[in-house]
Image (cartoon, rainbow, N blue to C red):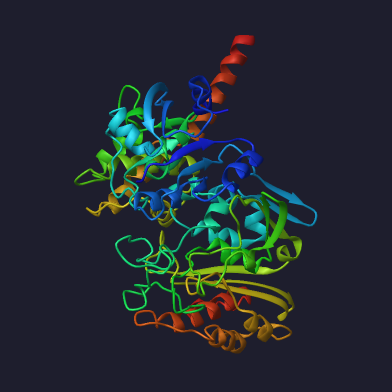
Amino acid sequence: MLEVDQDRARADHPHPQHAFVITLRVNDEDHRLAVDARTTLLDALRDRLHLTGTKKGCGLGQCGACTVLVDGRRVVSCLTLAVMNQGRSITTIEGLGQGGLHPVQQAFIDHDGFQCGYCTPGQIMSAVGLIQEGRTRSDDEIRENMSGNLCRCGAYTNIVDAIKDAIAQGTDPREAMTQAVEAIRQDAEQGGA
Amino acid sequence: MVPFAYTSVSDPLAAIERAGGGTGVEYIAGGTDMLQLLQEGVRAPLELVDINGIGFDDVSVAIDGVRIGAMARLADVADDPVIRERFPALAEALHESASPQVRNMATMAGNLLQRTRCLYFRDVTMPCNKRAPGSGCAALGGQNRVNAILGNSAQCIAAYPGDLAVALIAADAELMVRGPTGERTILAENLHQLPGDTPHVETVLKPGDLITAIWIPIAAAGRRSHYLKVRDRATFEWALASAAVSAAFDDDQVLEARIAVGGVGTKPWRLRHVEELLTGQRLDRALAREAGERAADGASPHEHNAFKVPLLKKTVERALLRIAGLQGDEA
């Protein structure tokens, strides 16, 4: 049962509702907020939680400016309702850098991967999702798999360079996890010796 | 967006009960087309039933075929090793649909049921018989470059936009449907209907019907297949013309063939007469060309989309050359 159903049960409204009190887990923090059934995840993030790093572009899933990670996968937050995202883990651009810039953010700066910057949070979130998917074996593959993010300034060339650099810097989370597991194993071996 | 109520269910029967009761109650799954339609005021349901909790999201392989859960996300099915190896046309159609973000969200059944990209269907200020029956068709005398050349009626020339449905026809796929009166099976080919005088009726599904799975019989796994999509830009765009071709060969002789095309018909379009032309013949360049030439038989283009006739012919020819191993991409 989703929490939305629990709320309904508590409120003794067995019928479908137009408004809900929901809990969204964003950047490892639970937020309780009141939303209309119509509220998109994007609008909830920006207007209710004031996480304005996620940008609103077309509102129709065509530009990718609103890209966030839901349960680790990149999605466009304009094409899903907030109420549908309870119980999921949402990561926005604000949640990327823990105490500093995320390597993909740093790579975008180093390679001048933007001009006006409006599409940049979406580009970066999409790049993080892409690197996790591992579809980065060639420039063409990176371009193909970044096609859900438009940049009207035309910074595409530098965005591809930034993504390649971020990968070269070893930000592939799968690689990082493999390294972490290996480190834990070595620690355990040393502890047991 | 017009206000609507929302409920979520984890039991498919509860979902069917809610949606089968009457008009105005709709399912929402991936939401990628529904949210666009809601944002633009094209659809105004009274209630949305969120079915993301019902399951039906796995790919399972049996001895006689593959069962794909209707709620499986496009990205997951496109990457499934069995789908990639055995049903390349299906994997290609999925990989070339939408954007990576949308493929992570959209479901298989939702993709089949996506609505047309006709400019006038999505613009509520314009007449559209599909959106508002009896209001007229603005595409007939308007911007109809993306519209259909096959299956048109005097009321509607909206093209069916999807890729997956086209690939499924070439794979002999069946849809498992559960509804208020029980379960039944529908051939993927029979899901969509011609617009005729009722363009607002797009499929054979009734209120409350829920597609639970897609079944692909093993026969399709033994055939060579390819999905070729031609569009205005290299990626993240709907097809202007596409072809799903699937054929079983004995050496270079075609034993049986399936040809379906997209982006050109008012529904996903099977080319039976082209299949018959190929069957029993040696698939060489001449035959591929002849098959391509027949692909647009019966086409009725309008002011801005006559280019789709030669485009469709060449798309079918190229796709056939590809499965024949004839390096046909320069055809």
Image quadrant in which the N terminus of chain A is located: top right
Position of the C terminus of chain A, as image quadrant, is: top right
Q: Please, which residue is most extreme toward the left here?
A: A116
Answer above or below: position of A91 versus A122.
Answer: above
Give the residue displayed 74% in from the left and 61% down from the top: B217
Residue A146 seen in render = no
Q: Residue sitting at 36 percent across and 60 percent down?
A: B122
Residue A156 vertical placement versus B49 (above, below): below
Q: Relative to A22, does residue B140 appear above or below in the rendering?
A: below
Q: Measuring 36% from the left and 75% from the top, which residue is drawn there?
A: B144
Residue A38 percent across, percent down from the top left: 38, 39
Residue closest to the eye, B48 or B261: B48
* Residue A163 in view (yes/no): yes
* Residue B316 percent location from the top left of the image: 54, 78
Can you tell which quarter of the image residue B286 is in? bottom right
**Whole-percent x and y of residue B148?**
45, 75
Query: Which residue in the rendered view is the most extreme toward the right?
Result: B63
**Depth order, front residue of A163/B249:** B249
Is B15 positioned to the left or the right of B158 in the image?
right
User: In x, y percent, where is residue B236?
Assistant: 41, 59
Asked if A95 appears above or below B101 in the picture, the reply is above
Say which of A64 and B110 sits in front.
B110
